[in-house]
Image (tube, helix red, strand yellow):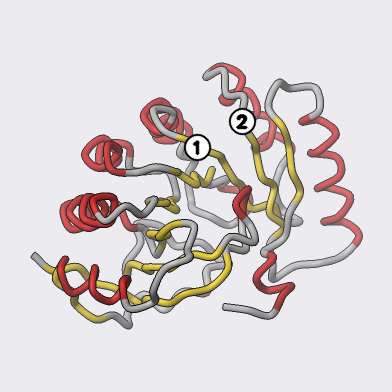
Amino acid sequence: MFGRINEIFASIQGEGVYFGEKQVFVRFAHCNLQCSYCDTEFNRFQEYGVDELLSAIASYGGGFHSVSFTGGEPLMQKDFLREALALVKRSGTKTYLETNGTLPEALDEVVEFVDIIAMDFKLSSSGNSERAYWNEHRRFLKTARQKEVFVKAIIGAATTEEDFLAMASLLDEEKYRGILVLQPNSLEEGKHLDEKLAMFKNWGATHPFSVWVMPQMHKVWGVK
């Protein structure tokens, strides 16, 4: 079995609650969505066998917090991903899955081998897709909560109040008590976006989950 991998590299996590941690990143090719702000070259990839992938990860040595399986969308290659996750865990390394949170059935098949899940909420008004994924996100979160999970949403100038409130309502209904990271769209800046982020953070204070506003820190630090 082979997986299509865009790139493998070692760096510092710049998004979410584990920012600043050293990780080996395995970036999977292909995605089921077409987000307007995405900066990944999905058409460029190399095929790896599972043992080859493990050797490539091991070549970076030790001292890493975890291996981040990212994309693209790793769950599009769930069979290969499952084998890779299992081998990494067997080697004694934590596994960290970065996902758009829209493929709950695929998560069901790999979740036993995942330690940490960084789950996106894809808000249609943020430029993520032509439709909402509330049902998929709800189902995904139910499974993800078997493990450690935090959620993240890209916020842009066009992100609507309705989308934020719908996301907050879903998290309330699912009794989510973790962290919601609001990540400003790195392609946008300005007073209007700052005001929207501040407004959403204030609204979040009325809910039992915690709200962080956090940019992509690796771009701030100037690392990959």
Mark 2 and mark 1: span between their CA atoms?
A: 8 Å
Q: Earlier in the sequence, mark 2 or mark 1?
A: 1
For the point 47% across and 75% down, which residue is it?
A: 10
From the viewer's perspective, is residue 32 above or below residue 132? below
- According to the picture, the residue beneath numbered tag 1 turns out to be 149
Residue 26: image x %, image y %?
Answer: 37, 68
Q: Total number of numbered labels?
A: 2
Q: Secondary structure at mark 1?
A: strand
Residue 73: image x %, image y %?
Answer: 36, 58
Residue 167: image x %, image y %?
Answer: 61, 32
Most extreme residue toward the left, as rendered? 1
Question: In which quadrant of the rendered view does residue 190 lie?
Answer: bottom right
On the rendered image, what quadrant is the N terminus found in?
bottom left
For the point 85% across and 34% down, which residue is it?
A: 202
Foreground: 157 or 6? 6
For the point 21% across and 55% down, which residue is it?
A: 87
Question: In which quadrant of the rendered view does residue 171 lie?
Answer: top right
Proximity of marks 2 and 1: CB atoms separated by less than 8 Å = yes
For the point 22% across and 58% down, which residue is it?
A: 84
Residue 181: image x %, image y %?
Answer: 66, 45
Q: Which mark is residue 178?
A: 2
Foreground: 224 or 151? 224
Q: Which mark is residue 44?
A: none
Label 2, residues with CA under 10 Å away: few <14, some 14-19, many ≥20: some
From the viewer's perspective, is residue 57 above or below residue 210? below
* Badge 1 amino acid: Val
Left or right position of 73 against 38:
left
Label 1, residues with CA under 10 Å away: few <14, some 14-19, many ≥20: many
From the viewer's perspective, is residue 167 above or below residue 85? above
On the rendered image, what quadrant is the C terminus found in?
bottom right
* Badge 2 amino acid: Gly
Q: Secondary structure at mark 2?
A: loop
